[in-house]
Image: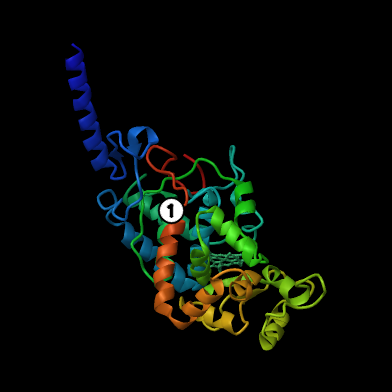
Amino acid sequence: MDAIRAGLGLIVLVFLSSTLSTAHPGFYFDWGGIGGNGGLYSTLFPEFYQYSCPQLDDIVMSVLEKAIQREPRMAASLVRLHFHDCFAQGCDASVLLDDGAGIVSEKRSNPNRNSLRGFEVIDEIKARLEEACPQTVSCADILALAARGSSVLSGGPNWDLPLGRRDSKTASLSSSNNNIPPPNSTLQNLKTFFGRQGLDEVDLVALSGSHTIGLARCVSFKQRLYNQNGNNQPDEALERNYYFSLTSICPKSGGDNNLSPLDFASPAKFDNTYFKLLLSGKGLLNSDQVLLTGSGGKTTDLVKIYAADEGLFFNQFEKSMVKMGNINPLTGYNGEIRKNCRRVN
Ligand code: HEM
């Protein structure tokens, strides 16, 4: 009797394993080895939606192309959105949730308020995907795909993107406030913030290279112009002419929302000019310039290397984006596939 029951159990298990693996390419049964998760484990991989949503790439890219054509800055905003998602509670689309039952939106956090953008583009991608492949593609994966597509469409690198993240049912305002580094960070702070996420100095420098595109508000760099060290003096690291041009955009009082490019030489082109500008004292944020000037690390050398060789920067950027995209994803039976990225199902 026991033997029959065991035999039946095995058949059911094999059946379940094969159905789940085909229907849900993210699932694999772990026959008692490493992997934990109650014998079920799953990892991200690029072909995750190969069968369940073959149109995925085309849909994402066609929405992005239009959005970035309308407004080139959108590429930068979408790259940043993925970063702010991953650093708060992992890459789980928590950043996209609006205030609602039990949800205090991360959109209100200090790093995000009046600053984070691109939500409507994510909504548009999601709406198109819900038509083509309903309840299949997670908002967290859409953020990762939008970041990669934005790099490509701005002339930056392309990479194999592991997929299969699921969406959170929660958001964390405190995680967003506490884990995303502020622009006046010292090098040591930056290393600590990145270290907490399992990212090292190489990732820090390469990912900061995203500041080759996009804009920042005056309030994000004002301290450097007027009171860097509490002595009413500008940051000595700022090149003189650059300093004067910034003061005209960003006055001592008011103008907090005035915008300046992070890489004024080529603000819409993903290239290595950001690093070249750092070498001549023309980094916009304190967190940018300290990668060169901060002591006690190898970031100075990395800035010089990436300034000299765009290929090396691109190569490392690809690796570091994949690494960032792997921060605490929800997989398997955890989380859900939201129908609308702004609220839980
Ligand atoms: C190293 C620590 C970092 C700090 C302190 C930092 C800080 C900032 C700040 C203050 C802004 C301007 C926001 C505003 O004024 O409204 C900004 C913009 C931006 N950040 Fe970062 N950032 C960091 C790392 C990253 C990373 C890792 C990425 C992506 C992988 C990224 C991508 C961007 C992009 C693309 C923009 C321009 C966004 C736009 O134009 O809408 N940043 N960042």
Q: Is residue 287 visible?
A: yes
**Towards the viewer: 33 or 19:** 33
Residue 300 falls in image quadrant:
bottom right
> Outermost residue, bottom direction?
241
Please state, as top left, top right, bottom left or bottom right, where the N terminus lies in the image: top left
Quadrant containing ligand 1 reads bottom right
Q: Is residue 267 visible?
A: no
**What percent of the width, then of the height, locates residue 119?**
52, 57
> Outermost residue, right direction?
231
Callout 1: 10 Å neighbours few (<14), some, many (20+)? many
> Outermost residue, front direction?
296
Q: Residue at x 33, y 36 (%)?
A: 40
> Outermost residue, top direction?
1
**What percent of the width, then of the height, locates residue 11?**
18, 26
Name the residue carrying label 1: 326
Q: Residue at x 60, y 52 (%)?
A: 176
Mark 1 vs ligand 1: CB under 8 Å?
Answer: no
Residue 258 falls in image quadrant:
bottom right
**Towards the viewer: 342 or 205:** 205
Residue 34 in the image: above or below residue 58: above
**Towards the viewer: 56 or 91:** 91
Query: For this view, does 315 lie left or right of residue 33?
Result: right
Residue 215 in the image: above or below residue 1: below
Q: How is the image coloured?
A: rainbow
**What percent of the width, then of the height, locates residue 304?**
51, 79
Helix, strand or loop under label 1: loop
Query: For this view, does 343 lie left or right of residue 173?
Result: left
Residue 225 falls in image quadrant:
bottom right
**What percent of the width, then of the height, locates residue 93?**
49, 50
Q: Amino acid at mark 1?
A: Asn
